[in-house]
Amino acid sequence: MAATTCWRSLAYHQWLAKGAPVYPDQPIYGRGFPAPERPDELSYANGEQLYVENCAVCHSEDGSGLYQDGEYVFPAPWGDGSNNWGAGIVRTHTAAGFIKNNMPLGQPLSLSDQEAWDIAYYMTQQERPQDPRYTGSVDEVLEKFGPTFHKNSSYGQEREVDGHRLADHANWGEKGEEVKPWNVGQPRFEDLDVEK
Ligand code: HEC
């Protein structure tokens, strides 16, 4: 994982060097993976099944990844050890683009557009650490960022499968509150064609 850590750190420093705000109101447009066209219908159940078949071997069925000797061998796509609700990849089209172009590891572009979107739909409706811009109220965050950043995420929405309201918690995950500034707008997962 050393290479991954360096890559992230490098990307972060390049991003800072451009004078990008640490707390952007708008997503940052960095290196990205174009999302395939959104299919008319997305299926949570199909996404779950595809995830179990194609992804769980590395990322585990419950999304906790594989943590060994103090490091993530395979990162957690959701849950306490994952990216928080402020990261670009929580937006379904960004996740679909990333998955289509990068996953399963070593088999880029092997999933159909529908499959990539269904998996992304499933993955982005799981819980993860709170958005760094959280004020104590999901509704307040939505008021401010609902029309922009969270337009394409499931933040604050009720999950269709069980009615659970996503992100309605003060859990900051394993990385804790100190990740606040720099986990926002990580350029890695941003795509290039999202509406501003
Ligand atoms: C053979 C193991 C393997 C399989 C199978 C696999 N992944 Fe990954 N995945 C990885 C590794 C390793 C990384 C870290 C890559 C990096 O950071 O450069 C990763 C990164 C990711 C990330 C980014 C998470 C983060 O925080 O960096 C997501 C999301 C993801 N995978 C989703 C999936 C999905 C969805 C599937 C199934 C379609 C899948 N992966 C299949 C190994 C795998």
Image (tube, helix red, strand yellow):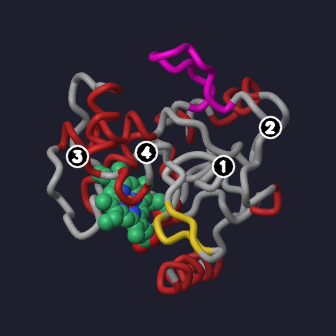
Q: Position of residue 39 (x, y in %)?
A: 21, 31
Label total for image: 4
Q: Which mark is residue 36?
A: 3
Q: Upstream in the sequence, badge 3 or badge 2?
A: 3
Magenta run includes residue 166 = yes
Q: Upstream in the sequence, badge 1 or badge 4?
A: 4
**Is 61 situated left or right of 6 in this image?**
left
Please tell me whether mark 1 or mark 4 is closer to you in this view: 4
Rendered residue at 23%/46% (across/down): 36
Q: Upstream in the sequence, badge 1 or badge 3?
A: 3
Element on which disc 2 rests: loop
Q: Which residue is mark 1?
A: 80
Q: Which residue is mark 4?
A: 61
Q: Amino acid at mark 1?
A: Asp
Instruction: Using the numbered discs, state the Cα–Cα distance from disc 3 to disc 2 in whole angstroms.
Output: 33 Å
Q: Amino acid at mark 3?
A: Pro
Q: Which residues are magenta?
A: 155-167
Figure check: 41 above or below 83: above
Please tell me whether mark 4 or mark 3 is closer to you in this view: 4
**Is 140 situated left or right of 4 in this image?**
right
Q: Upstream in the sequence, badge 4 or badge 3?
A: 3
